[in-house]
Amino acid sequence: MDLGVLEKATRFPFNLHIEPTALCAVLEERLRQEPLAQIERYSSLAGLAQDQFGVTLSLSSADGPRQIRAAWVVGADGATSAVRRALGVGLPGFTWDERSVTALIDADLDRIGYTSFMFQVDDQYGAVLQKVGPRRWIHVHPEPLAVTHEDIGRRLPDIIGRAVKDAPIRVLDWRSERMHQRSADRYRIGRVLLEGEAAHVANRMIGHSPITSFFDAYRLSEALAAVVSVDADDNVLDAYAADRRRVFLDHASPISSSRKLLVGRFGDQQRLDTELDQYRRAAADPHYLREMLLFNNELAGESPVAIAARRQR
């Protein structure tokens, strides 16, 4: 698919894939430039309590317990969020009966015509491949829960080899994880807000969870800045919480589930043909392709500041 059709919609008509460790290094370096920011490692959240003026966090570490006081707290600590659990907020939804296996591989897949993002549609060897650097690719595929860690490790070179047409590969690292489609009941509880996978989680096969999380951070930064710096009413935070939950439930979760089933468990040939017809049409019709690619605009949601202002009129 030619991403050049997005040239009039964005200054950056391309996909950017980056390994999580490399992304964390970029973010840390940027954070260190902020004079009020402090990075703290090897501490865990033991509990929190809040009142009308702020939040008290109780931390445990090798140096012993201590407390931190903050006006606002953002829980962005992943699907097993200690912040969310301390608030007693549920994460309803369902868990897939497969696990995802993510492998970082060294391979020259450009030579065999692979582009930077690929769906391998196959009910036995379905996979998603993303290029994350020179000769570096991420390969993600589903495995039954009954398959042991040792079995996955033994099978991995063969499974990846079939997906990449037996091109020479070297597995650099891999991990397996359970897959979920879940959302917190609420994304705001008083002075504590949830974002990213602390608020919602989708299957690991298709990257709508991290994309949605990036937009969460963008919208939450906008909302908190309005409250802290512009003295806006804190109902802008309610607008953030409601709209981001809507975006996940109405857009991110359904499309990620649909594409996961397309890649590795389609079963019904008629349904597969219907799904693939969308991509065939996109390949032939630049306008349709542009509209398909602009789906991510739905994941951006609305400005919480604009939503709150509209409600006050």
Image (cartoon, grey):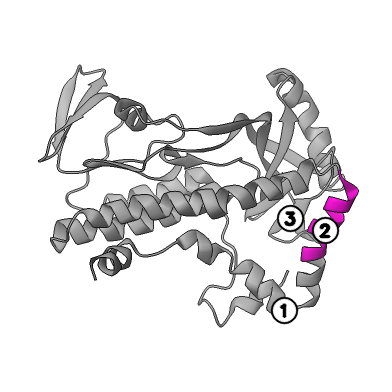
For disc 2, the marked residue is 274
For disc 3, the marked residue is 118
Q: CA distance from mark 3 to mark 2?
A: 19 Å
Residue 175: x %, y % from top left:
62, 31
Residue 281, picture quadrant: bottom right
Query: Dividing the image into 4 quarters, which one contains the C terminus?
Result: bottom left
| In-image side of 286 versus 201 (left or right) | right
Element under disc 2? helix
Q: CA distance from mark 1 to mark 2?
A: 19 Å
Q: Which is nearer the N-term, disc 3 or disc 2?
A: 3
Give the amino acid type for the residue marked by disc 1 in the picture: Pro
Camera-nearest residue between 1 and 279:
279
Element under disc 3? strand
Q: Which is nearer the N-term, disc 1 or disc 2?
A: 2
Residue at 64 percent across and 55 percent down: it is 134
**Could you tell me if the residues under marks 1 and 2 are in contact, i.e. CB atoms within 8 Å?**
no
Q: Residue furthest right?
A: 269
Give the label, 3 or 2, closer to the camera: 2
Camera-nearest residue between 221 and 127:
221
Element under disc 1? helix
Residue 54: x %, y % from top left:
13, 39
Give the amino acid type for the residue marked by disc 3 in the picture: Met
| In-image side of 99 versus 212 (left or right) | right
For disc 1, the marked residue is 286
256 w.r.t. 85: above or below: below
Q: Residue furthest bottom?
A: 8
Give the amino acid type for the residue marked by disc 2 in the picture: Thr
Which residues are the magenta region? Answer: 268-278
Q: CA distance from mark 3 to mark 1?
A: 19 Å
Residue at 67 percent across and 38 percent down: it is 103
